[in-house]
Image (cartoon, coloured by chain):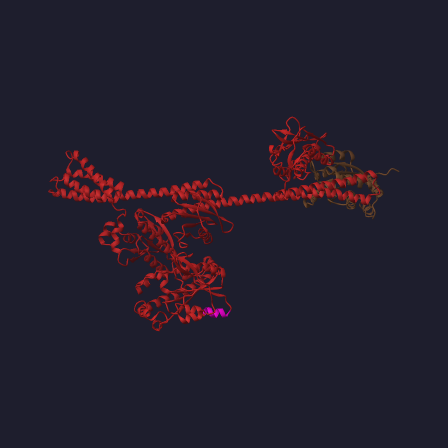
Amino acid sequence: MTDPEDRRPSPDALLAQARAEGHGKLKIYLGAAPGVGKTYEMLSDARKKLADGVDIVAGVVETHGRRETLALCEGLEIIPKRKLGYRGQELEEMDIDALLARRPQVALIDELAHTNVDGSRHPKRWMDVEELLAAGVDVWSTLNIQHLESLNDIVARITRVRVRETVPDALLDRADDIELIDLTPEELIERLKEGKVYAPEQAQRAIRNYFAPGNLSALRELAMRRAADRIDQQVRGLRQAQGESTPWAASERILVCIDDRPDAAEVVRHAKRVADRAKAPWVAVYVQTARHGRLAEVERGRIAETLRLAARLGAETATLPGDRIADTIIAYAKDQNVTQIVVGKAKRPPLFEIVFGSVVRELIHAAETIAIYVVPEEGEGARKRALGNLIPQPALSSRAVIESVVMTATATAAAYPLDAFIGVNNLSLVFLAAVLISALTRGLWSGLVTGIICALAYNWFYTEPRYTFTVADPENVLAIVAFSGAAILVSFLASRAREQTQSARAEAKTSRELYGLAKGLASVATEDEVAQTLAAYAARSFDAECAVFARVGVNDLRLAGTAPGSASLNDADMAAARWTADKGQAAGRGSHTLPGARWLFVPMRTSRLFAGVLAIARETPLSPEERRRLDAMSDQAATALERAHIARAYEEGRIEMESERLRATMLASLSHDLKTPIAGILGAASSLRTYGDRHDEATRTELLAGIEGEAERMQRYVVKLLDMTRLEAGGVKTKVEPLDVADVVSAVLKRAEPIAEGVWLDGDVAPGLPLLTADATLLHQTLFNLVENAIVHGARLVDGGEVRLAARMQDGAIVFQVTDNGPGLPASADARIFDRFFRGDKAKASGTGLGLAIVKGFAALMGAKVEAQNRRAHAGAIFTLAFPETATA
Amino acid sequence: MPTIRLKALIVDDEKAIRRFLRSTLVAEEFEVVEAETIAEARAFAEKLRPDLVVLDLGLPDGDGAELIAPFIALSKPAILVLSALDEEARKVQALNLGADDFITKPFGVAEFMARVRVALRHRVQMQGRRRFMMTGVSMWTSANVSSASAARMRSSRRASTGCCISSCCTRAR
């Protein structure tokens, strides 16, 4: 049995342990009733730790004015409470933000089950505690057993007081330490009598009611059993982490059926206890039949609430579409290897069950090997509801009654001519048709009403004696009874068919919407487009305001899309959105966090990453179905966002690579272009020094001229490099002044002479040119670079090379042209020729690859346009620098 | 008595480099020819049959390394490779192809001449591996190599052409 392979720690157990290590530790002082001394004990422990130098801060301590407790608070740092204005009143609440900012080692948070005042971040104090734990702060807290969610019903039964403030069991289960504060009932009552818990007259009342010795014993037992369970769990957890095989193979699996009855929550709590006892995983299931559409909003809300309760108690939840509840549940149960089904049983008259059937009976019938655990319904009101709920909610309108009357009149009229030919009994078929049509088009109620009126009409007009409601022939009595029965049946069947059609239509609408969204998302690429598409679809689908936030960086948000129009989100809304991003949980309206907000924020996530937040605001809150549809949409969009995210990351990577390549080219260029002149200078200088006396005069002059030339070349390169750097850094300042074009051209040609090396340079300035308003330095450098480019990459490569710098008027503006008679531009290079480090031909690698890039940058600064093309009639290239008309003075 | 001068071919597209290499080699009594491109270099090699080639790898019309094999086939010159790139791979490739030594730009003429001597000595060793090795070593290890000794060297190499075929075969293997 104990195969060593199987004794490795289970990954889940290790994961849970690891998770616990990053989190703060939770210690709960558990008591059976108020007054047993939880707070006192907690404070005493805190004082001891404080003396040991542990950083302990009290977030909230409820002393209830007890003297001993107050004394213990002395010397303890207490975070002042936050004041909240609420409906004109000023209320105080624990300041969680101050606590988070203070970040003590241990925070004392009294009264775990406390409900926060409206306007707090979380509706419950235990949620604040969860946030503190998640932030890595250890929390010590106190809890009375009656506040535990799963014991809520039992406690209510024992004490006849329903406790409204509950804490999910999961919180107690995850507590790292539970200290049971035990006091015998006698001692507690003694304390009460001494006035140590409540004021004397209050205490007397308490002893008679809640603190009756019987109650206290029962509560004490509950608390002890719960603490014992907890120790059991810890031992088991330890064994799992150490690789011991689980004592209970996960063979048991519990399923609980949820319906719209008010006691569904109790059934769920019951299932939780069953699951706990069996130490089994459990799942809560709601079957959504056609009837779901008929439920009132309250009931739908209750179902959703019950499902959430189950989730809080640790169940998986599922909503299954289906026709027949029992069949759907059994099929699902078999699929999921469920061993026990827990189902609530309504108190219903036997006749009711015979007519409408009973889910419980059907379950038992179909269960085969699955055990069915039936929880009886308790409390009054069960019977009252039983019938009312079965019959569809939308009651009869006067219009429907009129329609029924018209329907009946039509049937009566239609039957009249037939009266002569067919038997009276057969005429009922005409009336039945009217009932069928009514039920099909207007639903069950209309069908039933039409049935009644038809039965009366049929009796009045067609059964003997006619025009009375009396029936003479016993055969006709039978006919009317049969008709009525058939009418009822037809009404039920027809209305059910109608509902199914309607729900199918609603389903189809949902699928159509989701499909439409999917199609819309498929055709967009960027995050913003995805966000905008989602916002537009959701806004249309829910008739609401929508906003979509895309994730930026690790967990920051950016508003990426809104519909319709721009969304109004205030700081508090943004805080809620960020909370959703942080925790990956819904926040805002209709959720557990910041439920008072106007917006509902839903996280969008895929299995791999958190993609963003979908926000929706509407006057009426979303129904559970709408909420599910919203979730489906956000899931779909999350996938699309992820795709866009990956695409963008890829694109960024590509750009990164491109700039990396550029940098590599630049480094290569730098090393080549700086090293070559250095090599020349160094070589010539060392040659002069070593062989100076052996060289003749001409050689010496040549070497010296070479040194000079190479140094100038380096200077030109360095200037270009600096120009480029300044251009890229945006540090080039222009100083515009009127310039004489002829002066500029001759200055540029003069400067180009040393690099001409046999190339013929020619200037050609059209006579009578106006002054040009431009930056002299930029213009000079631009033209020089163009001329240099024409010499080095054009004219120098051919015999009899020529470069011509021309200036003339064209379309009322001044245009410079640099023409060479070299080999011209390579065909492939047109677009890239002005790129940095682009070199026309890799073989002709002389030159920096910067000249034309600088030309482009400078031209842009001067508002001029630069173009390159090959000459048409001759070999060679033409570079055109065209100034705008406005640059002419 | 007319001195027999070693013939050097400088292949480099940078005029400044050629200029000081030529002046240096001329001062060292070489007969110098310059080429800018691979095409020119091939033409001169045919005509001149140089004893020393100073070869730049980055040439406008291709990789200078592709000239190494044809040079060796023609006149078995000592080949000194110049490169502005300190790329290990290209140097290794050039040496594998048969170059005798390399020098990385920038460099001074003293180092250049030292490398020239190394290349020439290496060439003698390669060619006279069997018969003339001892002579070569004794001759080229002498401290001061003058142009006169280079001339002697040349004459002795001329005398050795008879055995050239076998040494070629050795290299080809």
Q: Quadrant of residue A712?
A: top right
As for residue A193 lying within the magenta part, the answer is: no
Name the side, left or right, on which A36 lies relative to A456.
Answer: right
Q: Quadrant of residue A42?
A: bottom left
Which x, y percent locates residue A667?
A: 65, 44
- In depth, the one of A551 and A684 nearer the eye is A551
What predominant SS class does the magenta segment belong to? helix
Boundaries of the magenta span: A45-52
Which x, y percent locates residue A803?
A: 69, 31
Which x, y percent locates residue A232?
A: 41, 65
As for residue A48 lying within the magenta part, the answer is: yes
- In depth, the one of B70 and A155 nearer the eye is A155
Q: Is residue A31 above or below residue A398?
A: below
Name the side, left or right, on which B36 lies relative to A839.
Answer: right
Give the colour of chain A: red
- Quadrant where the C terminus of chain A sits is top right
Count of numbered circles on the image: 0
Q: Which chain is brown?
A: B
Name the side, left or right, on which B167 lies relative to A493.
Answer: right
> As drawn, which residue projects farthest toward the right?
B1
- Quadrant where the N terminus of chain A sits is bottom left
Q: Quadrant of residue A144?
A: bottom left
> As drawn, which residue projects farthest toward the top?
A873
Which x, y percent locates residue A717?
A: 69, 41
Q: Is residue A73 above or below residue A130?
A: below
Residue A49 makes an appearance in the image? yes
Residue A23 makes an appearance in the image? no
